[in-house]
């Protein structure tokens, strides 16, 4: 058992945690340590959700890109509980922009001053915008202001059109006009804290072996704590009965618990949970999400040398290039390079119906246009992940309309990434949410 961990006493209530991502795993961990009898259900055949791993030509690594920042205190504390603190590796990274058909480094103050697409006055206003945002302590008033209005006021129209608008469209799609300024504040606050903790350097970290290593260790600790893990159990219905809360699954299994916490996306919870009030259901359905189509590429050689390249030129099928092998030792990938090409889309976007072959053709054509010398023959593996509900859009007055975690049905709780208010979707914020929810739900 990991240092400082104790198993469940088995004297508490019977809890079901529906959803075995990092959120559900952390909730199960906290509830078990509080003495409850916990069963963790996951629809997939493996735990991890968005953090799960897969294989690329024999290389096992994360299905989506993740990174640890020096300022990620909740994540680092949990890794220490799991006995993984000594396995974190740190590296200085670089950030790039692809603008005007060229790559530009934006990794330090000097490179910022040299950034060709902006005039000196534009750069000054951009720097002032970031500094001002980093000093805001209460983001709630920003929920009443659209991010576009706020950025135009602080950065100016030219900087907004050249830098901010392409980034907003890349991350938020057509919804950028309805997103509040609190979204940008949260993004800047996290990265600013990371640079401050890293002595003005972009120091990012990872666990050797990636999230396959993390999740394997986490599952082992949960088992030591007495948590029953049930993979391959997709929930079909959650409803109260005379003995508590009954959960029925698509595989025909059904079970009743004293308490249930479902970590599924809000619209999915609205479909699953029977007996909620009309207002609760409306609030759940009112949370708007973006999904992601993300390609993982194992390449013979590196691309541009930036961990993240923000693509601000129009016409590309992906919205960024994440070259994980600039951070992670390439020995972890058999000496090859690992690259992610993400595209954020609406949950009902027709792109979800595209085949892997169609996505591969479009994405590789985009890389060939962007990266000099890139050739499709460099691709050793290409896999596509599709997830319809990833990121809850922080619309205007978001916290006013957010569904509460405790429902009107005694014993039924709903906790998901939509409850990350004034934050960004990342593993550290997810663990923080789980810690907060577990303390409140006991």
Image: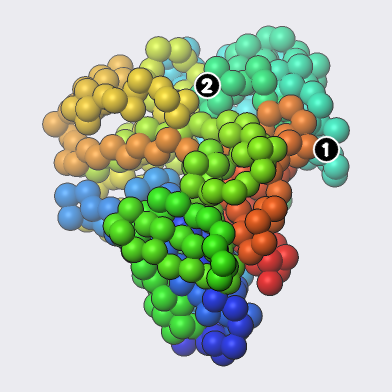
Quadrant that contains the C terminus:
bottom right
Residue 64, how many percent across, how many down? Answer: 39, 45
Task: Provide the secondary structure element on which disc 2 rests.
Answer: helix
Task: Provide the secondary structure element on which disc 1 rests.
Answer: helix
On the image, numbered disc 1 is attached to which residue?
Answer: 140
Judge left or right: residue 396 versus residue 338: right
Q: Is residue 91 above or below residue 96?
A: below
Q: Earlier in the sequence, mark 1 or mark 2?
A: 1
Depth check: give the residue in front, 319 or 195. 319
Q: Residues within 10 Å of mark 2 (few under 14, many from 20)?
A: some
Residue at the image position 55 percent from the left and 42 percent from the top: 270
Q: How is the image coloured?
A: rainbow
View extreme (left): residue: 377
Judge left or right: residue 60 versus residue 36: left
Q: Is residue 183 above or below residue 126?
A: below
Q: Which mark is residue 173?
A: 2
Residue 305, how many percent across, how many down? Answer: 40, 38
């Amino acid at each position: 058992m990991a240092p400082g961990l104790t198993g469940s006493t088995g004297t508490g209530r019977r809890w079901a945690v529906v959803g075995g991502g990092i959120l559900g795993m952390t909730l199960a961990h906290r509830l078990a340590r509080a003495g409850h009898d916990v069963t963790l259900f996951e629809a997939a055949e493996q735990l991890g959700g968005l953090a799960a791993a897969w294989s690329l030509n024999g290389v096992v690594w994360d299905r989506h890109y993740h990174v640890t920042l020096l300022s990620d205190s909740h994540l680092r504390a949990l890794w220490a509980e799991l006995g993984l603190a000594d396995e974190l590796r740190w590296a200085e990274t670089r950030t790039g922009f692809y603008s005007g058909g060229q790559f530009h480094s934006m990794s330090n103050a000097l490179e910022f001053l040299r950034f060709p697409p902006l005039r000196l006055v534009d750069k000054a206003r951009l720097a002032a915008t970031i500094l001002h945002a980093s000093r805001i302590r209460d983001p709630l008033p920003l929920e009443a202001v659209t991010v576009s209005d706020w950025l135009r006021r602080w950065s100016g129209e030219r900087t907004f059109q050249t830098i901010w608008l392409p980034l907003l469209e890349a991350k938020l799609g057509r919804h950028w006009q309805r997103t509040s300024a609190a979204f940008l504040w949260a993004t800047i606050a996290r990265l600013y804290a990371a640079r401050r903790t890293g002595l003005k350097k972009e120091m990012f970290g990872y666990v050797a072996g990636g999230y396959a290593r993390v999740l394997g260790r986490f599952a082992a600790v949960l088992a030591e704590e007495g948590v029953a893990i049930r993979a391959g159990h997709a929930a079909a219905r959650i409803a109260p009965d005379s003995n508590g809360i009954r959960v029925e699954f698509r595989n025909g299994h059904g079970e009743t618990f004293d308490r249930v916490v479902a970590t599924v996306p809000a619209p999915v919870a609205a479909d699953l949970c029977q007996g909620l009030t009309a207002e609760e259901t409306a609030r759940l359905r009112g949370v708007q999400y973006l999904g992601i189509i993300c390609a993982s590429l194992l390449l013979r050689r590196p691309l541009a040398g930036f961990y993240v390249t923000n693509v601000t030129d129009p016409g590309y099928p992906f919205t960024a290039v994440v070259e994980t092998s600039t951070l992670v030792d390439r020995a972890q990938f058999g000496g090859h390079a690992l690259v992610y090409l993400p595209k954020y889309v609406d949950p009902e976007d027709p792109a979800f119906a595209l085949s892997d072959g169609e996505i591969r053709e479009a994405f590789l054509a985009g890389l060939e246009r962007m990266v000099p010398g890139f050739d499709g023959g460099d691709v050793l593996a290409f896999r596509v992940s599709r997830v319809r509900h990833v990121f809850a859009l922080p619309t205007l007055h978001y916290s006013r309309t957010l569904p509460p975690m405790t429902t009107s049905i005694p014993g039924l709780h709903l906790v998901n990434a939509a409850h990350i208010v004034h934050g960004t979707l990342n593993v550290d914020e997810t663990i923080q949410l789980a810690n907060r929810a577990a303390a409140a739900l006991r």
